[in-house]
Amino acid sequence: MPKELNLDIDQTPGDYPVMVLLVDDQAMVGEAVRRALANQVNIDFHYCAHPDEAIEAAQRTRPTVILQDLVMPGIDGLTLVRQYRANPATRNVPIIVLSTREDAAVKSAAFTAGANDYLVKLPDTIELVARIRYHSRSYVNLLQRDEAYRALRQSQQQLLETNLELQRLTNSDGLTGLANRRYFDEYFSVEWTRAEREQSSLSLLMIDVDDFKLYNDTYGHLAGDTALKQVAEGIGHFARRPTDLAARIGGEEFVLVLPSMSREHMEVQADKLQAAVHALNVAHASSSNDARVTVSIGGASMVPRRGGSQEKLMELADQALYRAKRGGKNRVEIAQ
């Protein structure tokens, strides 16, 4: 059973339970807010991209703060604010309106509709977290006066545990624990868009276990699964920064997404990774490289051009991987 929280005015901000619901049709804003809150204590984040699903999402997640975009397709944010205030489940939930501009008339209309706060998006993380915690704490203090508070906490805890498990199952590869192909595709697309907007470099390593079919033929598929887990663990160690992502995208094929990393630094990382897998000393009698499991790595790095395609970066890395395979395996090739 989760421990029931006993909140009082002496508690630090991080002790207050916060359930944030962001309603915004821009996926990039959702990702930016998710990252800003990712390492915050006791903050659980939920995102709704469709305004016609906002009320249902609020009833399901039971937020302590709603971040509501002002301009959305089909229905404007102020109309949604009024709908929240008319719904018994969300009548008292604090609402922070997000707008693209500082406009006195728009701000007045937002407060008249029932908003509690107004922010020009996106504020810096310190301000965003401070305002979220302030309004959430006020709401939680209000709920403490009601017998429904205990039910809310139990419901939130169960929802959080369920969401964490669903997220793990949805985003993770079942065998290795790394990200799966679906999550890689989503993440790579987001990072490509960010790199294009910021005109920063984006690097990608494609990694393939050498002679893996021969390994399975020699040792069996169970041993093959064990070997893949060992290789995956080694690859995972090279996703050191919060923005790095290691994923398994095929049977014996892996990738590393390395945002804001130069080609030179990426090449150093690739060489270290190739050597680290070699140093695992996983026996492979049918291998052409020192009778042990090895990997071939192809890398590519670029600053995305406006309107360019992320497939080009994958194509360059894949071609480099092909050259590494053709060049004898257990090696690194980087696209020029």
Image (cartoon, rainbow, N blue to C red):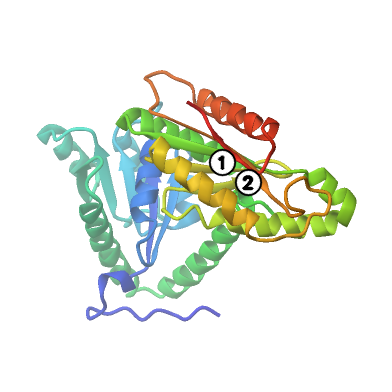
Q: Residue at x 30, y 32 (%)?
A: 198
Q: Residue at x 59, y 47 (%)?
A: 247
Which residue in the rendered view is the most extreme toward the top?
A: 307
Q: Nearer the viewer, residue 31 or 269?
A: 269
Q: Secondary structure at mark 2?
A: loop
Query: Which quadrant would the N terminus be assigned to in this image?
Result: bottom right
Q: Nearer the viewer, residue 176 or 138?
A: 176
Q: Secondary structure at mark 1?
A: helix
Res 97 quadrant in image: top left
Q: Distance of mark 2 from mark 1, alpha carbons?
A: 6 Å
Position of 73 with respect to 205 (left or right) is left
Q: x, y percentage for residue 336? A: 47, 26
Q: Residue at x 31, y 70 (%)?
A: 14
Total marks placed: 2
Q: x, y percentage for residue 50? A: 46, 35
Tell me the residue that label 1 is attached to.
Answer: 184
Which residue in the rendered view is the most extreme toward the left?
A: 104
Amino acid type assigned to the residue bearing label 1 in the image? Phe
State whether residue 300 is above or below residue 167. above
Res 165 quadrant in image: bottom right
User: Which of the numbered marks, if any, corresponds to residue 44?
Assistant: none
Disc 1 crowd rating (10 Å Cα; few below 14, some 14-19, many 20+) is: many
Which residue in the rendered view is the most extreme toward the front?
A: 290
Q: x, y percentage for residue 241? A: 41, 53
Tell me the residue that label 2 is attached to.
Answer: 180
Are the residues tagged 2 and 1 within 8 Å (C-beta)?
yes
Q: x, y percentage for residue 175? A: 71, 56
Amino acid type assigned to the residue bearing label 2 in the image? Asn
The answer to whether one can see residue 124 in this image is: yes
